[in-house]
Amino acid sequence: MTLVLVASVALLSACLLLAVLLPWSLSSNLQGRADPSGTWALAWGIGLGPLALTAIAAAGVKPFMTCHLFGRQLARLPLSRWLRRKPKPAATPDEQATPAEPPLTLSRLEHSIARLFRGLDPLETALSIWHKDHLFEVRSLVVDAEYSFRDIALTGRILAGLYMLMAVLPEHWEINHTPSWESEDRVALAADARFRIWPGRLALDVARFVLKQRAKARHGAAPVSG
C-alpha cells in the first residue's frame, strides 16, 4: 500500500513538473461575417489534441460555448449567464401574455465553470497573461479580411491603417485584406493561429491573479471604520 502511494505521488509530481516545464501546442480559428441585411455570425474554436472548445454567437441566437472530448460534448454553457445584466424594464401586457421560456438547467461542472469566469475580468486577465514570459507564445497568425462600408472614406482609412499595422507586425504574423468599394456595410473575417502555452505556469499565474482580484474585491467591499 505504501509503495502504491509513493508511486502515485511520484507520478503526480512528474506530471506537474512536465506541465510546468514543457509547452503544449494549440491551434485556433476564428470566423466572422456581417452583411447589409443586419445578419451576423461569429464562431471561435480552439483545439488541443482530442479536446476542443467552441464559442458561437449570431444574430437572433444567444451566445454559447461548448466543450468536446473525442467528438463527444461534455458541456454547453450559455455565455450570457457569465455577463452581468442590467435590470429588465417592466414587461408590457403583450410580453406578459407570452409564455416565458423554461430556464436552462446546468450541470455541476457547468455551474463551477460559470462561477469561476463570472468573477474575472476577461480583458484584464488576458492582458495579464499576454505580458508574462514563458506562459503564452504565438507561433503563427494569419488573418484574412474582406470589408466595405457605406462611407467609402472609412474604407480608405481602414485600408491605410491596416497597411501601417502590417509594417510593424512580427515576421510570423500576416494580414491579408481585400477592400471593396461598394457603398454597403459588409465584413468577412477569418483568422487562423498556432501557439504554445505552458499549462502549469499558466495555471499558477491564473490562480495567483484570481486570488489577487478576490482579495482586492473584498478589500473594496469592506466597510470603512470611522
Image: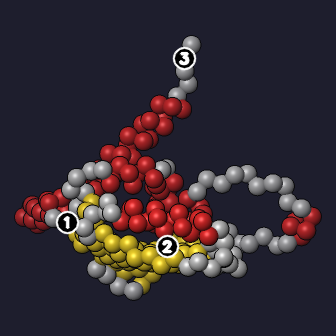
Left or right of 32, for residue 99? right
Residue nearest the observer in this picture, 179 or 49: 179
Residue for point 52% across, 28% down: 222
Residue with the mark numbered 3? 225
Q: Is residue 18 visible?
A: yes
Residue at the limit of the structure toward the bottom, as seen here:
71
* Residue beneath the point at 40% across and 76% down: 176
Residue 23: assigned label: 1
- Of residues 12 and 181, which is closer to you in this image? 181
Give the Cα separation between the discs numbered 3 and 2.
45 Å
Instruction: Classify residue 7 as left or right of residue 56.
Output: left
- The colour scheme used to paint the residues is secondary structure
Q: Which mark is residue 55?
A: 2
Count residues near mark 3 (Cα–Cα under 10 Å), then give few for <14, some for 14-19, many for 20+.
Answer: few
Callout 1: helix, strand or loop? loop
- Which label's residue is closer to the chain start, 2 or 1? 1
Residue 208 location, quadrant: top left
Q: Nearer the viewer, mark 1 or mark 3?
A: 1
In percent of width and height, residue 186 lies at 60, 77
Q: CA distance from mark 2 to mark 1?
A: 24 Å
Amino acid type assigned to the residue bearing label 2 in the image: Ala
Question: Which residue does the image show at 27% across and 50% down from the upper left?
Answer: 132
Q: Is residue 189 left or right of residue 152?
A: left
**Viewer-side label of 3, 2:** 2
| Residue extending farthest left | 3
- Quick check: can you spot residue 31? no
Q: Secondary structure at mark 2?
A: strand
Distance Cα–Cα, label 1 vs label 3: 48 Å
Q: Is residue 87 above or below residue 152?
A: above
